[in-house]
Image: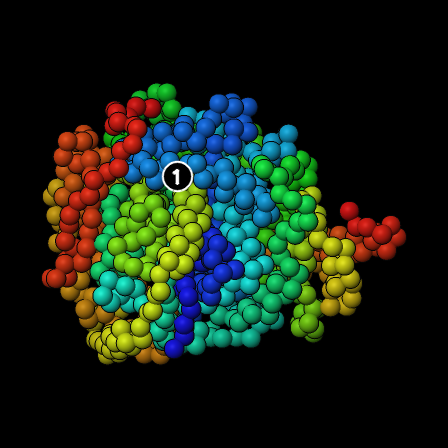
Amino acid sequence: MLFVLLRIRDEIDGTLSFRSSCRSAVCGSCVMVINGKIDLACRTQVASFGTNTIILEPLPNFEIIKDLVVDMTPFWNMYEKIRPYLIRKSPAPEKEIKQSEEERRRIDQFVNCILCACCYGACPVLARNPDYLGPAAMAKLERFILDSRDERPHSVLDEINNENGVWGCDTVFRCIDACPKDVRPTDSIVGLRKAILKKKLFGKYK
Amino acid sequence: MLSHDIVIVGGGLAGLRAAVGLCEKYDVAILSKVHPIRSHSIAAQGGINASLANHPEGKDDSWEKHTFDTIKGSDYLADQHAVEIMCRQAPIIVYEMEHWGCPFSRFEDGSIAQRPFGGAGYPRTCYSADITGHVLLNTLYERAVSKGVKVYSEWYAIALVIDNGQCHGIIAFDLINGKIFPIKSKVTVFATGGYGRVYQYSTNALINTGSGIGIAYKAGVPIKDMEFVQFHPTGLIGTNILITEACRGEGGYLINNKNERFMEKYAPKAMELAPRDIVSRSIQTEIEEGRGFDHPLGKYIKLDLRHLGAQKIMEKLPGIRKICIDFIGIDPIYELIPIMPCQHYSMGGIDTNEKTETEIKGFYAAGECACVSVHGANRLGGNSLLDTIVFGKLSAIAIDEYLSGNNVNPEERPLNAKLNDVETNIKKIANNTGERPFSILSDLSKNMSANVGIFRKKDELALALEKIMEIKERYKNVHVSSTSLHMNYELLNAIELGYMIEVAHTIAIGAYLREESRGAHFRRDFSIRNDENWLKHTIARLGADGTPEISFKEVVITRYQPMERKY
């Protein structure tokens, strides 16, 4: 699909706007709605539709800037809100912080997220509540909470213990359907809900 | 006028690492033509080299051995003192990235996992499955977010402003709002990446136009060793998406149409894990001598992973499996992957020293757009991620030294003058009546792949240069459909194309002049290395007539005398 768009811009309509870069489904630039399905244009094969007409739309839940380009600012704001970085209190060892293969495996699916915002566009909660944190930001938070090396304070869970956080999710799994990298953001939301309950019952989440 | 202490152009690994090193003390801004997380560092797969000695077969590894392998891999063109610095820094920056949260794959003892890679004496490539670039870029971006680094996202640096031997800043194009601004800065860093799109067949992203190198060159900064272009042995046919060297590091085979592991003939000891220049030439030779396979998308060789088994493929190479399924409809657990050599990396670039300084005061470069040189005539797999982070870090240290010791006063006058030039040029493009950029770029990139490719020859290189001169003429009249500055990607393409033609010119002229074969530069008419005449760097600077002026520079040799390169 991406190569069709590039050809249209090159040879037919030079004013057509869409984002693109890696053309190999790792950079997350070329997300759009293709015949009703949210996906990356680069990995979508035109021949798979078997029709001569394909309908392209910009990603929902965002303001349109031009053609297929949307303003991703709200997505990045939510991402930054959860403090998307490893937080440590212990002093760093001389070499690596040890982590078992099993501990590394636990964060694997969330590490795979490419921040393309397919899930954000697919989320029905965001369609009615723009203050909702959204699937990608919660998957990122879970990636750090589950990381054996992370030592963020328990209070971070209070910030998402509300309708704009984990309790806002409808659990209708649209984010899972939309993810081009097989990440399951709903798993992270359920995981965070469990952590909140664990903290309430036992005073700690790990 | 917009103004910062330091403007860093490029939000990939080198640019982010420089920013993270400077932002606590200085007013730093990153300018990136895509959101930083979309930078091409994200696509690196196989890993990053560091002599951690975690692998059971790598317990004797050391930074000295890493240095030797890198110098030998470079075909002795690398500056040896710079390679030493990089290899000593390697474990330090890998541990630092790990401490900042990078999710490396792990060995059973909880240490960072390492795998064998081409041209390396020990398994020293640290990795995270086959998404190492993705995890490193995410970690550094996370670090930048945690420190509140200012980012101008989707802003393109359109020109570099140098006056009187000093850099005063850049002219920037805000792509979304369609406005052009001068940005004044005491220091400007280019971390703009490679130029893969100058070639028809490249593993690189669409954003890898190399325009950063072209911008610096047009502003009078010398560039180095541009004829050394790395062709990766295994690009997927059709899309040319990278199929990581880790496939061979994990034990994959290369197979010709006689069902032979043909690397036996070319590198009997290292086999598939010979350095990339050698493997790419071997594949090309097999294809040219009729032992490849035919496909409407081109001739190819097969990469066989089947014997690794489903579990190893799913665990170590899940991204490769997904690429194969999504983009060519085959599953490497059961089928062979059709691959061909494709342009992959630029050993050459903006001429810098080991501190990332250029000839111009206040102008620095790091990462693929720069040439220190640590890769010489051929880069080893796993050394490019290392280069970006090490030299991003070292640029921050050098810039701090420069700003602490000097009273730097950039001026607005040269910025305003350049702004005027840029606006005039854009008006001209809008009023031109010639071709649109795509057809010119298509001819340029076909010319480069056909005539300045893996195997080179004098008459073909002469033809390439002739065509580039014709293309330069055509470009003078390049035309775009709309004169709007708002979200006008075609206009951006037209502007970048001008710089791409200059980059191509310096590659072709370097290749034409260098009458020897060294690393990735192979001349059929001069098929051996000639240390007596050619153990030197090629320097290109913009001449008065608008064509490159070539001179040469000594290679720094410390303790490794050039030897024959056998694998």
Say which amino acid is labelled 1: Ile
Residue B277 seen in the current view: no
Q: Quadrant of the N terminus of chain B?
A: bottom left
Which residue is painted at 19% across and 71% down in the image?
B477
B453 versus A56 height, above or below: above
Residue B389, given in percent of the width and then of the height, sits at 45, 47
| Coloring basis for residues | rainbow
Chain ID of residue with mark 1: B
Describe residue B48's horizontal placement relative to residue B103 as left or right.
left
Front in this rendered view, residue A6 or B370: B370
Looking at the rendered structure, the number of numbered marks drawn on it comes to 1
Give the left or right position of residue A91, taking residue B45 as reference: right
Indicate whether B522 appears above or below A144: above
In the picture provided, is B414 more to the left or to the right than A42? left
Horizontal arrangement in the rendering, residue B75 relative to residue B9 (left or right): left
Classify mark 1: helix, strand or loop.
helix
Give x and y (percent) for residue A51.
48, 62
- Residue B248, located in which quarter of the rendered image? top left
Q: Picture coordinates of residue B132 (x, y %)?
A: 51, 43
Q: Give the residue displayed 55% in from the left and 51% down from the top.
A: B139
Q: In the image shown, does A128 or B110 lie closer to the viewer?
A: B110
Of residues B59 and A130, the one drawn nearer to the viewer in this rendering:
B59
From the image, tell me which residue sits under label 1.
B85
Q: Name the residue located 48 percent from the left edge and 23 percent from the top edge.
A: B60
Residue at x 58%, y 62% (from the top left corner): A117
Q: Quadrant of residue B408?
A: bottom left
Mark yes or no: residue A81 visible.
yes
B30 shown above or below B519: below
The C terminus of chain B: image quadrant? top left
Could you say where residue B363 lies in the image, as x and y percent from the top left?
Answer: 32, 59
Q: Please tell me how crowded label 1 is: few (under 14), some (14-19), or many (20+) other residues with Cα within 10 Å.
A: some
